[in-house]
Image: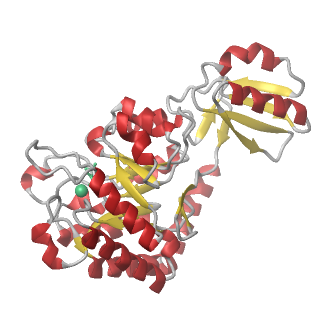
Amino acid sequence: MDIVELEKGFQETEEIIKKLANENGNNVEIIRGGGISDTIHFIGDTRKVSEKEGYVKELPGILKIWDVSIPYKNIARIGAGKNGEVVHRANRIVEVKGLDGLIRKIGNGKHIFIVGPDSPQSLEQTLTIAKQAKAIGEKYGVLDRIIIRGGAFKPRTRPTDWRGLGWDGIKILDEVKLETGIPYVTEVMDHTMAEEVAKHADMIQIGTRNAQDFELLEAVGKTMKPVILKRGFGNESEEWFSAAEYIANQGNLDIVLCERGVKTLFIKEGYCRNTPDFNVITHAKKKTILPCIFDPSHVAGDDKIVMQNLLGCLPFKADGSITETLHIEAFRKEQKCDAAQALVMSIYEKAVQAILEYEKSVQPFVTEMDNYFLNRSKA
Ligand code: PEP
Ligand code: MN
C-alpha cells in the first residue's frame, strides 16, 4: 500500500490515514487534485503500514489503493499504480537554513552556489573563503543562495594521503558558520558518525566512494538533515536513484542529487578527471522529484576547465553547483587535497556573474524550448 486515493470531503478518513501513517513510521504527502479526489502517498518504508490495507480499504471515501512498482518509489516523479494509473508529483524543494536567518532553497529554479575548500585546513583559509563568498552574495543579492562546503573527513584513494582534519575540521566549519551566518555541508563516511556530525553540519554529503554504502545512507537518512548524494563512480541512474531511496525510506526526502562525472578512458588520456554526464541531470529531474546539482571540480581535475564545466551544466537545468575554491592563489601549493582543480575566489566571482547573466538572458529561451517539447509530447 503506497498510495491511497480518497474522495474529496472525507476529512475524517484523511485524519485516520495520517494517524495510521504516523503510527507505522511514515509521513504522508497529499496531492490535492482538481477532480473529485486527492491522493495520499505514504512516505518511507511502507511494509508495516501495508499490513493495514484491509482496514483502510473499508474506510469511507476510499476510491483506490495502489502499490507502486518503481524501485525508488519515495522519490519517483511518477506514482504508477497496479492498473497503470499515473500521478505526477511536484518538485521537492530542499531547504537549508542559515544562522543569518536566510533559507537556501534548492530546486526552486534558481541556481544555488555551494562553494568552499575541498577540505578545511585552517580557520584562516576557510573563514576567508566564506567571507569572500558572503561579499559576493551581498554584492549580487544572492546571499540566500550560498552554502559553504568543506570535507573535514576525506575519503582518499591512497592510504598514505592526508585524510582531513577530522573533528578539528568540523570545529573550523562551526566557527566559520558562527562568524558568517552561512550554513555548511560536509561529508560523512561512516554510519556510526552520522548522528554526531549532524549535530554540527547543516547538510551532509555522501561522496562518490560511499554512494552505495547502504548502512551509511540509512544512518544519514535517519538524521533528517538535508543530504547531497553524489553519484557513484560507475553508477547507472537507477542505481543512483535507488541509493537515494535508502535515505528516503527513512522518511527523509531532503535529498539533493549531485552529478560529479563518471569514470571513462579519458582519465588515462589525461584530458579530464571524470567525464561529465550532463544528460543525466535532465534524466534525474524527469525521473525523480529531487533537485539535481553539478560538481564541476571533480569532473575537471584542473582549474583551467572548471569554469567551462560549471557553465555547461546550466542549459541542463542543474539546480546548483558545488565548487572547490582557494582564498588566494598562493595557497595552492599548501593545499593537501585536490589542489589542481581549485578555482581562486576572484575567478569564482566571475562564474557567479556569468550564471546570473545566463538566468536573465538565456534561461527564458531554454524554458521556451522545454515548453515546446512538453506541449509536443502532450499533442
Ligand atoms: C569532495 O567533494 O571533495 C569529494 C571527495 O567528492 P567526490 O565524492 O565526488 O569524489
Ligand atoms: Mn575534493
Camera-nearest residue between 127 and 261 = 127
In the image, taking residue 178 as reference, residue 82 lies left or right, namely: right
In the image, taking residue 253 as reference, residue 349 lies left or right, namely: left
Name the spot of residue 26 as percent of width and height, x first: 64, 31
Query: Residue, x 27% and y 49% (percent of image)?
Result: 153
Residue 312 lies, with reference to residue 17, above or below; the image says below
Name the spot of residue 365 as percent of width and height, x first: 51, 73
Camera-nearest residue between 234 and 99 = 99
- Count of picture labels: 0
Camera-nearest residue between 297 and 333 = 333
Residue 259 lies, with reference to residue 196, above or below; the image says below
Quadrant where the N terminus lies? top right
Query: Residue, x 15% and y 65% (percent of image)?
Result: 335
Camera-nearest residue between 78 and 221 = 221
Residue 364 visible, this orientation: yes
Name the spot of residue 165 as percent of width and height, x first: 23, 54
Name the spot of residue 154 as percent of width and height, x first: 23, 49
Query: Residue, x 61% and y 24% (percent of image)?
Result: 46
Residue 136 lies, with reference to residue 223, above or below; the image says below
Q: How is the image coloured?
A: secondary structure
Query: Residue, x 33% and y 34% (percent of image)?
Result: 212
Residue 113 visible, this orientation: no
